[in-house]
Amino acid sequence: MRTSPLFFLLALSAGTSLAAQGREGDIVVPTFRFANGQVLDNVKLHYTVLGQPRRDAGGTTRNAVLVLHGTGGTGSGFLGAGFAGELFGPGKLLDTTQYFVILPDNIGHGKSSKPSDGLRMKFPAYGYTDMVHLQHALLQGLGVNHLRLVMGTSMGCMHAWVWGYTYPTFADGLVPLACAPTQIAGRNRMMRTMIRDFITQDPDWKGGDYTSPPRGLKAASGILYMMTSAPLVQHRQAPTRDRADSTIRTYIEGRFRAQDPNDMLYQFDASSDYDPSPHLEKVTAPVLAINSADDLVNPPELGLMERLMPRVARGKYILIPTSERTRGHGTHSQPAIWGTYLAEFVKGLK
């Protein structure tokens, strides 16, 4: 079915309008002690919010939704027509006239405190537990004492699981998109290790004190590209030899110019402390976990979700079949594909 130009323009204007409505700001945490004992003063946490918080007679925030981005992303990345237009627009499931949507830039990302601000490899090593504690601090700074939903994509998906056992009564529901609630191992870990090694083993990296980006960043970017796409998607993008060559080279050159190597190292190293599997019985909030069958990072043939989800008291797992609509790992950012499951889940929340 062809999409009409009018529909495209309406969808685009909806996304643009929501982006314009977003209000940006910063919360500064005066002193934060990381799980490894390191301390950082004046930790800046950047955010974008849509809508207004609403509290009940007892002062509890009842309409706040925390949406958490993936590795290397930012909160404002959710403001495009494909995500915000599908979820946050007028009459949509999380209409921002009814919901207070919070889109943080996690530590190490975007406009929040990160190694490339100046400390480089002297920046404290952070893990997913630290990131979730800082998200909680951000909410406190915004005056939000309860969440309707914690949603997250990829890294944010994993953060949603950490929320489930770290702050088990803080959210009415959890929606982790594109991850598994267990430590990162196997091929997923191998790819992350390659990303790290390509950068740190390049002599031009100079222990983080590089004067120009190390060439190993290009190889690391190539691994990232393969992690986040899928064969059907890549073949549609590049159906000829020449198109395939130009597509991957353009992507790698773009990442090489835009990505800070130290930030990238920290972002991928942060997953090293992730392992919700010993804590799944502590997750008491309802959970809607959604993965896609063409996800290279979380391939369904591992059977991880089928083994782990029965331990989640109020958990439901959806596996989206591969189709012309799925985008591999990137299906997590396509609510047009999984939005009906989310609608049913939200309707069932107490």
Image (cartoon, grey):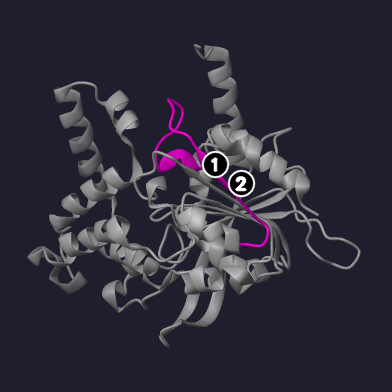
Query: Counting other residues with Cα less than 10 Å from the Cα at mark 2, is it few (<14), some (14-19), or many (20 or more)?
Result: some
In front: label 2 or label 1: 1
**Could you say which quadrant of the image residue 207 lies in?**
bottom left
The image quarter in which residue 323 lies: top left
Kind of residue indicated by mark 1: Leu
Magenta part of the chain: 312-332
Q: Residue furthest left?
A: 203
**Viewer-nearest residue: 70 or 124:** 70
Q: Amino acid at mark 2?
A: Gly
Taking the magenta stretch, the answer to whether it contains residue 321 is yes
Residue 46 can be seen in this image:
no
Identify which residue, 163 or 288, lies in the foreground.
288
Q: Is residue 287 magenta?
A: no
Task: Give me the residue at 16% from left, 60% from top.
Answer: 198
Residue sitting at the far bottom: 37
Q: Quadrant of the C terminus?
A: bottom right
Q: Are marks 2 and 1 in contact (CB under 8 Å)?
A: yes
Q: Position of residue 305 (x, y in %)?
A: 49, 54
Tell me the number on the disc at residue 79.
1
Q: Tag 1, which secondary structure? A: helix
Residue on which disc 2 sits: 22
How far, Cα to Cα, is label 2 from label 1? Answer: 8 Å
